[in-house]
Structures are given as C-alpha cells and as structure tokens.
Amino acid sequence: MNNTTPAIEAENLVKTFGDFRAVDGISLTVPAGSVYGVLGPNGAGKTTTIRMLATLLRPDSGSARIFGHDVVREPTQVRSLIGVTGQYASVDEDLSATENLIIFSRLLGLSRRDAKRKAAELLDEFSLTEDATRPLKNFSGGMRRRLDLAASLISAPPLLYLDEPTTGLDPHARAQMWETIRRLVDDGSTVLLTTQYLDEADQLADRIGVIDNGKLVADGTADELKASVGLSSLRLVLADPSQSNLARALLGSALQTEIGAAAESGKLTAPMTDPSKAPELLIHLREHGIEVSELALQKPSLDEVFLAITGTQNDRSAA
C-alpha cells in the first residue's frame, strides 16, 4: 500500500434522514499513520459520518475513499482495510476471552489452528493472558474494552475506527488504552477516534475535527485550534492575597484589560496577547512590593476551544 495515499479522503459528504440533514457537506483528509480525533456535541453528525466511511451508510451525495478505494463503488475492498470498535463490546459474556477471539477469527476465515494462534497473540498484546479462560461477565470495564479492541485487530486492518474507546473506564484503564492506541500507530496503523474526553483528543490526536450541526466547523492540530480562539493566559498566585486588588489594578492598567481574580486565594488571571511580556509584568508587580508565589502561562484549553466553536458547554465530555 502506498504510504503517501491518505487513509481517508472525504469530499462534501451529505446524508439526510427525511427533512433532517445529519451530515451537511463534510470534507476531511486523514494521512496514513496518524490519529484523527473527532469531537462534537450529541447529534452533531459524528456517528453518521463514520458509518458512511465504514460503508454502513450510503452517502446521499459527495464521495469518500479509504486508501484510494471508493466507499460506494468498492465496499468490499474498503471493508478489508478497516476495523471498527463501537462504544459497547460486541462479545458473548458467557464465553471466555479466548473463546470470543477464536469465534471472531473463524468468522473472518481463519483456520482453527490460526484462530487459536491469533487469539493467543492478541491476548498477550492486550495483557489479558492471565484472564483468558475467565467468562467475560467477570471482566472489568477496562478489560472488556481491551478485548473489544483486540477483536477489531484480528484481520490486522490498516485503518481503525474507534468510537469512544475509553467511555466509562477508570483513569488507569484509560491510560492503558491510550498506550495501546499509541503503539498501534507506531506500528503503522491509522486511527479515526471519536471521544467524549477532550483531554483524550488533546493527548492522542495529530489533528482534530470538530463537527457541529452536520458540518466540519474546525480542523487542525490541538495547538492550531487553541490559537484560533484567542489569547493565552498568565495565571498568578500572590504570596499575600490581601494585595489582590492592587495587583489587579496594576495588571489591568499595564494590559489595558480587565483582570479576573479570586480575592480570597490571591489568584489572578490575565489575558496575554503577547506572552513574551510576562517577565515585564512580574517586574512591574515586584516594583510595587507584590510578590508572586506561583505563576503559569497557559494556552486556551481544548474545553474553551470546544465552547468557543460550538457554543456548547463541556463539563467533561463532548460526545
């Protein structure tokens, strides 16, 4: 396969359901060997877009190619190139991890011997060997998600669609899944990741697309998206909280803007159009007898980007 061929090329994809335009002209390109994160509010069109890219829905108009193969004209070739992991494990809870993987392998055409070998390899890859003979109903949520991802890799597809792969996992299990995804990409896979965790997109995605009302409203690296919505912030903690009002006045005058503060804790937040001026501000405060115990210069968070782009508040997720 030509590594210069994009893993995904979509042009003006449209899908309607009655009078509802679920996907409204989405175009995107995902390079091979990368992670592309997809964010958006509920009902934004994320899942419909992925279903079209996976040949599960036929676009009403527009086109999409997977490694150069058209999803409408060449669905069989496309399906041979992709693996899909949904939000919930497609497994039999009364069977063991080994039995589930062997069944999936046999359904994909592997011989009984090759199916057993593949199951053993994947259980080892996902640190499930010690629990291989346990019924899945005794598995934790993290173990189930790892098994579901393992099942999607039986055919070793070069492109994986991961639909919220860490939903409901504890922080340790999420970290394990992140490491697995990074390892897959290091080995040459391409990942299209929908996630309800903005920090997950920030950590994993080479590029991020934000879908809202059926349209791709933003596309870029995390840093590009953060830069697109505005200013960095200088966040200070004063050694003496009683000096908050004076510090606010000094910073506000120097920056010609309003300074946010939590007076009881001596915490101030100053928007910065030019982060290089931060040292000058600290010297300015010190000249007036104000000492700073902590400081940080921060870019906008991805949560702030999401709110600015979609107008939707994100308390933890953006599914």
Image (tube, rainbow, N blue to C red):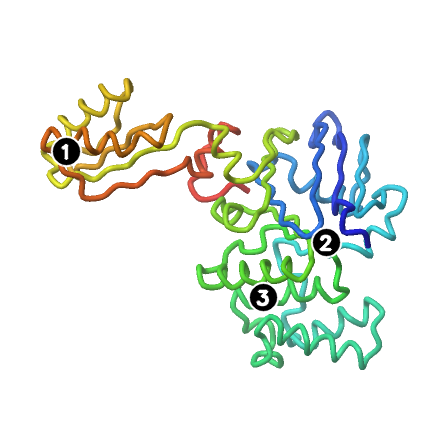
Q: Are circles 2 and 1 on residues that touch, CB within 8 Å?
A: no
User: In the figure, residue 243 lies in which quadrant?
Assistant: top left
Residue 246 percent across, percent down from the top left = 13, 26
Secondary element at image label 2? strand
**Residue 125 relative to residue 167: left or right:** right
Which residue position holds label 1?
286
Task: Please determine whether, in this image, residue 77 is positioned above or below residue 270.
Answer: below
Quadrant showing the N terminus: bottom right
**Residue 283 relative to residue 256: left or right:** left
Which residue position holds label 2?
159
Identify the mark nearer the N-term, 3 or 2: 3
Measured in 3D between alpha carbons, the distance from the residue under mark 3 to the one under mark 1, in whole angstroms, is 55 Å
Measured in 3D between alpha carbons, the distance from the residue under mark 2 to the one under mark 1, in whole angstroms, is 55 Å
Residue 287 percent across, percent down from the top left = 13, 30
Residue closer to the observer: 188 or 91: 188
User: In the figure, residue 144 lies in which quadrant?
Assistant: bottom right
Secondary element at image label 1? helix
Task: Please determine whether, in this image, residue 165 is positioned above or below residue 245.
Answer: below
Measured in 3D between alpha carbons, the distance from the residue under mark 3 to the one under mark 2, in whole angstroms, is 21 Å
Task: Please determine whether, in this image, residue 88 is positioned above or below residue 58.
Answer: below
Q: Are circles 3 and 1 on residues that touch, CB within 8 Å?
A: no
Of marks 3 and 2, the one in the foreground = 2
Identify the mark nearer the N-term, 2 or 1: 2
Which residue position holds label 3?
144
Instruction: Give the residue at x 62% y 72%.
Output: 125
Identity of the amino acid at label 1? Arg
Identity of the amino acid at label 2? Leu
Identity of the amino acid at label 3? Arg
Quadrant showing the C terminus: top right
Of marks 2 and 1, the one in the foreground = 1
Q: Pointer 2: residues within 10 angstroms few (<14), some, or many (20+)?
A: many
